[in-house]
Amino acid sequence: MTTNKNLLVELFVEELPPKALKRLGEAFAAVLVEQLKAQGLAAAASRATAFASPRRLAVHVTEVAGRAADRAQSQKLMPVAVGLDAAGQATPALLKKLAALGADASAVAGLRRQQDGKAEALFHDSTVPGATLADGLQKALAEAIARLPIPKVMGYQLESGCELPGWSTVSFVRPAHGLVALHGSEVLLSVTALGLKAGNATHGHRFEAKADPVVLRDADSYARQLREEGAVIAGFEERKAEIARQLRAAAERIGGGVAPIEDDALLDEVTALVERPNVLVCQFEKEFLEVPQECLILTMKANQKYFPLLDAAGRLTHQFLVVSNITPDDPSAVIGGNERVVRPRLADAKFFFDQDRRKTLASRVESLGKVVYHNKLGTQGERVERVRAIAQAIARQWGGAELAAQADQAALLAKTDLVTDMVGEFPELQGTMGRYYALNDGLPQAVADAIEDHYRPRFAGDALPRNEVGVVVALADKLETLVGMFGIGNQPTGDRDPFALRRHALGVVRMLAEKNLPLDLDALLRAAVPAFGDKVQDPSVALRDFIYERLAGSLREQGYSAQEVDAVLALRPQRLGDVPKRLAAVRAFAALPEAAALAAANKRVSNILKKADAVDAHVSEVLLQEPAEKDLYAALQRIAPQADAQFAAGDYAAALQTLAALRAPVDAFFDGVMVNAEQTDLRLNRQGLLQVLHNAMNRVADLSRLAT
């Protein structure tokens, strides 16, 4: 039995792609540990700690055995009648099978007989030696490297002295220069990877390491030695937390309630760029603050990886934070260098802003006719006209002349910032710059806000447009995209959705539902189609189903059961703002003692009506013969009007609760009445009664979908 020790594996490489580093580190650790556990070398309780810095991927694993335990193996060979002759001697087939397993005729006496189905079979029992750590780690390391989510593989020549026979190049995310494999303090010398042999030495910070190389004493000293001797914080999350701490501390030193902008993606990227973070305070000239802060923030974050500082009101200040990878005694040169680098970027933004304001948005409309939108759908100019037409149709359904006029103006100008210099340089600012330029042109605030907001919601959880004009134009813009792309056959397939149609559909859903708009979905889709003329085939039916599918997925993510969602959306409710109330009503109904029986009865009614020809919801009292059908009819006459009134008032829960009183007469009807009577008039009358029942019961949701 071998003693368990902790294991450390590190790949030392050239600078890894920062946006992929976190994922690479997590995947390297997860796969390596998974493979060690699969071979019995790591225990189920073994804990793995991943390390990832710009120049290393590593993992520390607790409780790793030097050799896996031997395991018993039983292998079925063949039926006894095939393996042994009449005298009980091994047949050639059995001997051949044993030879393939590395055994000979002497093993025949030790074979085990066991019933296998109807026949008795021969089994060979053996003990498989456990894998050594060196062999098991070699396999695990190869698998971990092969399964890394590498964004782009590069090939490189092996270093002199490291070349393996027959190898000329290696393919990996970046050239690798070192491999560490330590089991406790023991170096697993036989382990290799990427043309490198395992050792116990790594390298620290390029400029600030106290020792180079850093010779590791054992697996457990890795992080401590790298920090103390190599000036490197090896753990990604530890380094990230240290950067966040320094950012907060620097802001507190400045005072005045300033705080660094919150951006977890930027924080992750900067964490992947430095090994020993050092946060410094820099500044730029206050005159640049005349430029919209979104422009300055974007250029500082995207191009320079700086953290802008905002005041307590959320306004950009002239100071920003830099995360340096060095800690000089005098940081002035580093600060000055970063300030010199950012100044031309901000000057460009100011130049673009000043130049763009010399032309009105209205004067740019004509230029959109020269910008191709889609080869089957024309230019951005043609698209703008379609959005205007759809916006007009929505405004007519919803509001008055003032809303229609403002929506038309916003739709006309919404895309004009696409031909400005600022958006040409920073496409992420489309809409945002349109708002600033609209205000500069003296347009109404509602129109300016709508120009920015018509892209909303841009992602899950994004804010909705802030005013009615914005909602109208945002709906029109998204419906134009959906109808146009569906109309030319560009629906999403599998994971592919190049035109973000799922996002656009969810945006439509969110606006209709969360704003509780008095707009019918089918009417919206029908109103959008004419704007395309003969460019598209009418996709309304397919598009409606697509939107309801997105709605269903969203509702399930919010915690509603698939059964509840199916019951409500089966009716294709036109006012999506009603859907949450319907779902709440269905959930309350499902908790009633009568719910299960009524759901089952509804399912039975639906099946009967499906098999019948077109059934008229009409009942002739003179044809009601059985007491149970008379009682059901009387109950419907008494209960249905009350439930209808509650439904009309929007009190869906009360309507379903009122209908629950039908359980007893419905049960009695199915117990005592033959629906499909031979006499035609009786059969049609009873089917008509069921149709009346079905109509009354299924206004809020299709209750038959609740039946188990």
Image (cartoon, helix red, strand yellow):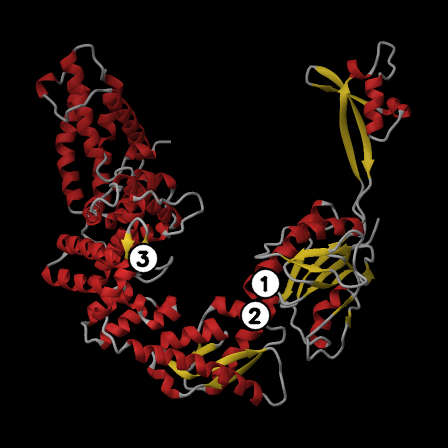
Instruction: Name the residue that disc number 3 marks.
Output: 372
Closer to the chain start, of discs 3 and 1, is 1
Q: Nearer the viewer, mark 2 or mark 3?
A: 3
Q: Residues within 10 Å of mark 3 (few under 14, many from 20)?
A: some
Instruction: Name the residue that disc number 1 marks.
Output: 21
Q: Are marks 2 and 1 in contact (CB under 8 Å)?
A: yes
Q: Nearer the viewer, mark 3 or mark 1?
A: 3
Residue 605 image offset from top left, x and y in percent: 26, 25
Q: Are marks 3 and 1 in contact (CB under 8 Å)?
A: no
Residue at 71 percent of width and 76 percent of height? 228
Q: Is residue 7 toward the left or the right of residue 99 in the image? A: left
Amino acid at dot 2: Thr
Secondary structure under tag 2 reads helix
Residue 109: name its quadrant.
Answer: top right
Q: Residues within 10 Å of mark 2 (few under 14, many from 20)?
A: many
Instruction: Name the residue that disc number 2 marks.
Output: 271
Closer to the chain start, of discs 2 and 1, is 1
Report the quarter where the C terminus lies.
top left
Residue 705: name its quadrant.
Answer: top left
